[in-house]
Image (cartoon, rainbow, N blue to C red):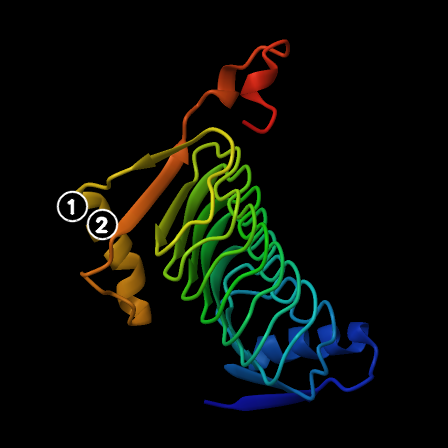
């Protein structure tokens, strides 16, 4: 399989985008080097390509991905994979705030921790975090799953809609209108099917499944206790 190498450095990001899009038409694999934690790398990637970013990247890497397989060697800044609609993103280290925000489908796999509000307003897909998810992760998630293997920070799953937050490990505190359920064997099997391709299945985990209590779905504006921090 042919490989195209693209050097970022201090070059204009627009030039980098054009080179990546051109390489995607003819190359099976793209390797992006000298990333310098630059922002907006690999936005709007097409399906059917493999692209690897050596080192760390800045904000919005992999945003609006439509099916590419993206590997980030080290850390990613805010909003990695925001609005993605298919494909797979692997972050080798830490993912900053709002990882996977508003994503529609696909999978984001974070090998380290994820920052605050991971999966905020997500509409589908899966976010798998081997470490801990940050403050208010899953805020207003409409659909999809966040699976955290290393615990969760405060206000977890705040104001959920139909998304699900699965946590193995300590949860500092729950957000507003959260219900914690003991998952069924069938539900755990579904989670294992997501984790199995990543090599992360462990049958000894004690899962906490968090869903919406649906109180916020039908609240009266005068009923402050339904929407203020309680």
Name the residue nearer the viewer: 220 or 60. Answer: 220
For residue 185, the mark is 1
What percent of the width, then of the height, locates residue 71? 51, 76
Read off the residue under disc 2.
Answer: 188
| Quadrant location of the N terminus in the rendered image | bottom left
Name the one closer to the observer, 105 or 20: 105
Q: In the picture, which quadrant includes the C terminus?
A: top right
Distance, label 2 to label 1, CA atoms, is 5 Å
Residue placed at 58% from the left, 50% from the top?
117
Image height of 24 relative to 114, above or below: below
- The quarter holding residue 148 reads bottom left
Above-or-below relation of 123 to 21: above
Q: Seen from this angle, which residue lies furthest left? A: 185
Looking at the picture, how far across and down is residue 102, in whole percent? 58, 46
Q: Residue at x 82, y 83 (%)?
A: 11
Residue 79 lies, in percent from the top left, at 64, 58
> Vertical placement of 31 versus 216: above or below?
below
Numbered mark located on residue 76 in the image: none
Residue located 51% across and 45% down the image: 138
Quarter where residue 43 is shown: bottom right
User: Which of these two is toward me, 176 or 54?
Assistant: 176
Vertical position of residue 84 compared to residue 222: above or below? below
Horizontal side of 146 relative to 82 (left or right) equals left
Question: How many badges with numbers are in the image?
Answer: 2
């Amino acid at each position: 399989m042919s490989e195209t190498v693209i050097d970022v450095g201090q070059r204009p990001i627009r030039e980098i985008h054009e080179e990546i899009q051109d390489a995607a038409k003819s190359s099976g694999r793209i390797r992006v080097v000298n990333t310098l934690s630059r922002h907006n790398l690999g936005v709007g990637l097409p399906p059917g390509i493999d692209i690897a970013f050596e080192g760390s990247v800045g904000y919005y890497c992999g945003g609006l991905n439509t099916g590419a397989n993206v590997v980030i060697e080290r850390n990613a800044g805010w909003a990695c994979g925001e609005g993605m609609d298919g494909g797979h993103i692997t972050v080798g280290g830490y993912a900053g705030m709002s990882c996977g925000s508003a994503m529609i489908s696909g999978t984001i796999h974070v090998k380290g921790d994820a920052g605050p509000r991971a999966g905020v307003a997500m509409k589908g897909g899966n976010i798998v975090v081997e470490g801990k998810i940050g403050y208010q992760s899953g805020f207003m998630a409409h659909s999809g799953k966040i699976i955290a293997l290393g615990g969760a920070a405060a206000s977890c799953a705040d104001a959920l809609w139909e998304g699900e937050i699965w946590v193995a490990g300590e949860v500092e505190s729950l957000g507003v209108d959260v219900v914690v359920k003991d998952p069924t064997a069938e539900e755990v099997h579904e989670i294992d099917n997501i984790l199995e391709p990543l090599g992360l299945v462990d049958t000894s985990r004690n899962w906490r499944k968090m869903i919406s209590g649906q109180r916020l779905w039908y609240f009266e504006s005068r009923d402050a206790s339904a929407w203020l921090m309680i």
